[in-house]
Image: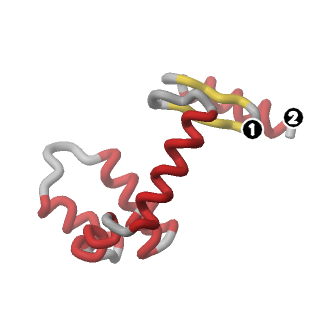
Amino acid sequence: MAVKQLAGDAAYEQVHDALMTMRGNVTDDALARIGKDAGVGVAAVTAQMDDASVTAELQANHELAGKLSISGTPTFIMGDEILRGYLPLDAMRQVAEQERADG
């Protein structure tokens, strides 16, 4: 959330993907490298993490998850469908195609 607020959607996506595919320990050096690659400084992100706007966004997401009875991951929402748990890629594609056809 802090990266997105500071550097936008592309940087958020890049950092998110790097963290999700990262192997090994999440160290300060690893975070600094990921931030540098995305063009955002770790110090700025760390400071932004404590900002009330980040807390408010996390709280709003938590409240929405509660309203939708989402209590675990992975959970995907496609159109009107809530998909809970792991779904193979082909099955996800079928749901997406059906939602596009219905939409």
* Disc 2 to disc 1: CB gap under 8 Å: yes
**Type of amino acid under label 2:** Asp
Image location of residue 78, percent across then percent down? 69, 37
Image quadrant assignment for residue 91: top right
Question: Could you classify mark 1 by the number of other residues whose Cα lies within 10 Å: few (under 14), some (14-19), or many (20 or more)?
Answer: few
Q: Quadrant of the N terminus?
A: bottom left
Task: Please give the label number shown on residue 102.
Answer: 2
Image quadrant assignment for residue 48: bottom left
Image location of residue 70, percent across then percent down? 54, 30
Q: Left or right: where does residue 13 sit relative to residue 63?
A: left
Which residue occupies 65% across, 32% down?
93
The outermost residue toward the right is 102
Nearest to the observer: residue 74 or residue 65: 65
Q: Quadrant of the C terminus?
A: top right
Nearest to the observer: residue 30 or residue 81: 81
Task: Please give the label number shown on residue 33.
Answer: none
**Type of amino acid under label 1:** Gly
Nearest to the observer: residue 55 or residue 2: 55
Q: Left or right: where does residue 84 sit relative to residue 43?
A: right
Vertical comparison of 6 with 81: above or below = below
Give the residue pinned by disc 1.
Answer: 79
Name which of mark 2 and mark 1 comes first in the sequence.
1
Which residue occupies 13% across, 61% down?
28
Image location of residue 75, percent across then percent down? 53, 31
Nearest to the observer: residue 52 or residue 22: 52
Vertical comparison of 72 with 55: above or below = above
